Image (cartoon, helix red, strand yellow):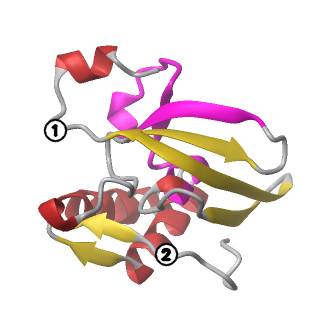
Amino acid sequence: MIRQENLPPVTISAGDYDRLAFLASFGLNNPQDRAAAAMLANELIRATVLPSRAVPPSVVRMHSHVEFRDDVTWDVRRAALVYPDEVDGEPGRISVLSPEGAALIGLSGGQSMMWWAPSGWRSLTLLRVLGQPQGWTTELRKRVP
């Protein structure tokens, strides 16, 4: 559940939108992914969808490298936002079908997202987008901080 007041604007590329909508609908049928899938679906419903070339470089999209702060623990992390099948158990990757990943997609630097988790309210703030991929390649996979 996402706290509805003060939600930041979300921008998603048309290319990302279709695959994310499929993941969200598929995840709603899987008890393990249901909460994150519902969160992702809510983000997609309220998102402004733009052609890929029109999405500003400061917006988190799939395969963006980001720096964000967990607003509960104040830990700062760097990671790449990836699809669930790209996580491969490697550090530095966050699945878009996780609460943190669903919170990050479409945010711009300085924006925060708050959601309910079994442990209580969680929140993160996107500090900055470190880089946008031109394409998903083996070389990009090796550059994840």
Seen as rendered, the residue at the extreme bottom is 5
Residue 6 within the segment the image draws in magenta: no
Tell me, yes or no, if residue 32 can be seen here. no
Asked whether, in this view, residue 142 is left or right of residue 137, the answer is right
In the rendered view, would you say 89 is above or below 45?
A: above
5 or 119, which is in the foreground?
A: 5
Percent of width and height locating residue 25: 37, 66
Residue 78 within the segment the image draws in magenta: yes
Number of numbered discs overlaid on the protein picture:
2
In the picture, the disc for residue 134 is 1
The magenta span reads 75-103
Query: Which mark sits nearer the N-terminus, 1 or 2?
Result: 2
Assess disc 2: are there few (<14), some (14-19) or many (≥20) residues with their C-alpha within 10 Å of its C-alpha: some
Asked whether, in this view, residue 9 is left or right of residue 136, the answer is right
The quarter of the image holding the N terminus is bottom right
| Residue found at x 61% / y 78% | 7
Percent of width and height locating residue 41: 44, 70
Task: Identify residue type, mark 1.
Answer: Gln
Pointer 1 with pointer 2, Cβ within 8 A: no
- Judge depth for marks 1 and 2 and give the one in front: 1
Percent of width and height locating residue 49: 26, 75
Residue 46 figure quarter: bottom left
| Residue found at x 25% / y 23% | 140
Asked whether, in this view, residue 101 is left or right of residue 60, the answer is right
Quick one: SS at disc 1?
loop
| Residue found at x 70% / y 65% | 114
Separation of residues labelled 1 and 2 (CA atoms): 27 Å
| Residue found at x 24% / y 58% | 16
In the picture, the disc for residue 42 is 2
Quick one: SS at disc 2?
helix
In the rendered view, would you say 17 is above or below 72?
A: below
Assess disc 1: are there few (<14), some (14-19) or many (≥20) residues with their C-alpha within 10 Å of its C-alpha: few
